[in-house]
Amino acid sequence: MRNTGFLIVLSGFSGSGKGTIMKELLERYPDEYALSISATTRAPREGEEDGREYFFKTREEFREMIRNDELLEYAQYVDNYYGTPKSYVNEQLANQKNVVLEIEIQGALKIREQFPDALLLFVTPPSAGVLKDRLTGRGTETEDVIHSRLARAVDEADGCEVYDYLIINDDLDTCVEEIHQIILGEQKKMRHQLSTIEAIKNELKQFVKGEKV
């Protein structure tokens, strides 16, 4: 078996439901997954707490993290910065947890450069109309912000072909289980199990030696 966990990047259009999917995945399988909490310069939404949904930083605090090389990746999105702190991710991977990063496409590409085996999943609603309805239905964004997010989605649609899987979020339960099964299947791929097959091969050699004695 691998001696480290998997790094999983979960991206998607704003309003695709990726945050809800991620939370549900961690609630259903708490022993298998760990959430990487991102740092951001955006203001907290109602009900959000520092250190739970995000590490909320000022712009200067965020720039200090960049200068100190404390981030695996960072990107600017709708006038705010988002980034992934290194220390927590590396600690959880070492503990054989599958670490889920909810980040945008710019960050996903940077993660793939550093972790070629990272699993990249892109979440989308079943249609653009559903996406617009979800953004409007939040009631937390201005019309200008909604327009910016829809415009951003056009650019993301042009870049999402680098992801390993496209996940259609039509039904939450189905979507969460689909993602879990994809991750289980990825873990069973031969390239991730070379240490297991090597151990079996060494045991077989010992059996063969024993038979010759």
Image: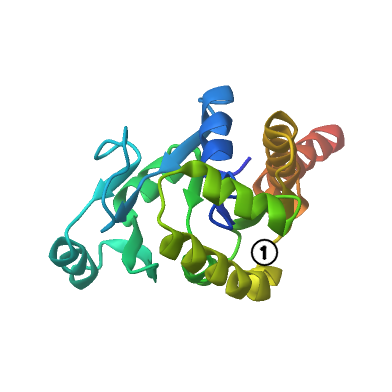
Q: Is residue 154 left or right of residue 85?
A: right
Q: Is residue 82 left or right of residue 208?
A: left
Estimate how packed mark 1 is, as few (under 14), some (14 to 19) or many (20 or more) residues with alpha carbons within 10 Å: some
Q: Which residue does the numbered mark 1 point to in the structure image?
A: 163
Residue at 80 percent of width and 34 percent of height: 207
Front in this rendered view, residue 176 or 128? 128
Front in this rendered view, residue 56 or 32? 56
Q: Amino acid at mark 1?
A: Tyr
- Quadrant location of residue 127? bottom right
Q: Position of residue 155 (x, y in %)?
A: 59, 75
Residue at 28 percent of width and 45 percent of height: 44
In this rendering, does residue 87 appear at all?
A: yes
Front in this rendered view, residue 120 or 195? 120
In this rendering, does residue 6 appear at all?
A: no
- Quadrant location of residue 28? top right
Q: Position of residue 198 (x, y in %)?
A: 70, 48
Q: Is residue 191 left or right of residue 27?
A: right
Q: Is residue 2 left or right of residue 53?
A: right
Vertical position of residue 88 compared to residue 161: above or below: above
